[in-house]
Amino acid sequence: MGFQWWCCHCMVLLFSSLFLWNGVLGHEYNYYYNETGVLGGNKISCNIYQGSWVYDGTYPLYDSSGCPYIDPEFDCQKYGRPDKLYLRYRWKPTSCDIPRFDGKDFLWRMRGKKIMFVGDSLSLNNWQSLMCLLHAAVPASRTIFTRKQDLSTLFFQDYKVSVMYYRSTYLVDLVKKSDGVALVLDSIQAGNAWLGMDMLIFNTWHWWTHNGRSKPWNYIQVGNQKYNDMDRLVAFSTGLTTWSDWVDSNIDPTKTKVFFQGISPTHYNGRDWGQPGAKSCYGQTQPLSGSAYPGGSLPQDGVVKSVLSKMSKSVTLLDVTLLSQLRKDAHPSKYSGDHAGNDCSHWCLPGLPDTWSQLLYAEMVL
């Protein structure tokens, strides 16, 4: 199947606001920070996703032993990681500062509302980060945790806030049929479960590259056409376009704020970060310095930005790819309680996903 895609590098204009949701104009990726806080002052233009990692002795923002919501695969300290320096880094944008995560303020702003992460295990990583940060802020707050099939929910009773995770590895459908399991690139049947939310944070990519026994489908389907396989970037672009059409058709931006969590990189080849002798992330203890990644940008990141640029509804990109590329040190590697081998795809908690959560908070308040 022929399909053309291209990368679009634009900038989004975000304005500081006293309200929960900041207004978005266009689809360009530029971010505005109010230098004196949300109560007013001079505005300066600042891309909060361009910067570098700096040492901060006040980090991490919580202890993994004090958070009951971390899955074993992310709990690196519990499962023997000997170093702690990777916990001590804070993201510093080049031209401004972002607010420190304030869990009480987050819950107060979101009181009575529903937040849902939708995606693969990287969404799970981010969801558990947010739960830990909120729990650390209000450890005595009454909570109810439920899990049913693909949906998990932590409900903060005192604030009436639901923080939810819906597992959907591709966003589009996996369908069991008589001739096998089909990855249907032009269908989303699970979308009804995503309606009625006040905030949606979507993510997908991790599973699009899987092959062999780790691939959960037998063939790809688009319309009535079946394919044994296809270029995975083409498949990803087609599936993501289906998702974007779903958002454009089903989401009212005056009621639901939609984010897309940018591509989370892996670190399995030291040549990508200028260390040819390194065969993986194992043994890496510090982030890369500076604001550039030797391996360059990712083509799947270009697909995301291209698809978002064509949408009619406002979707804010949490553009975490570059800042995550710099964190070759932040993966579980061999210190995972529930992931065989060397995991250089997911992230330790506490760790990098806490910065993702901080940037989500910054998008809310700046």
Image (spheres, grey):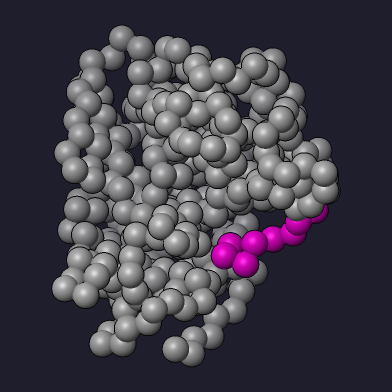
Q: Nearer the viewer, residue 321 or 115?
A: 321
- Please report the residue visible at 69 percent of the width from the left and 15 percent of the height from the top: 57
- Please report the residue visible at 23 percent of the width from the left and 15 percent of the height from the top: 142
- Please report the residue visible at 47 percent of the width from the left and 78 percent of the height from the top: 230
Please tell me whether residue 195 is drawn above or below residue 329 in the rendered image.
Answer: below
Q: Nearer the viewer, residue 206 or 353?
A: 206
Q: Is residue 131 left or right of residue 316?
A: left
**Residue 174 image-quadrant placement:** bottom left
Question: Residue 268: x percent and y percent?
Answer: 66, 47
Prevailing secondary structure of the magenta residues = loop
Question: Residue 94: x percent and y percent?
Answer: 75, 42
Q: Residue furthest bottom?
A: 2
Q: Residue furthest top?
A: 140
Q: Quadrant of the N terminus?
A: bottom left
Q: Find the magenta span and give its range.
A: 293-301
Q: Is residue 189 left or right of residue 328?
A: left
Q: Residue furthest front?
A: 213
**Residue 190 image-quadrant placement:** bottom left
Please tell me whether residue 298 belongs to the stretch shown in magenta.
yes
- Please report the residue visible at 54 percent of the width from the left and 54 percent of the height from the top: 263
| Res 52 visible | yes
Question: Residue 318: x percent and y percent?
Answer: 52, 50
| Res 200 visible | no
Please tell me whether residue 338 belongs to the stretch shown in magenta.
no
Q: Nearer the viewer, residue 261 or 81?
A: 81
Q: How many marks?
A: 0
Q: Is residue 63 left or right of residue 187?
A: right
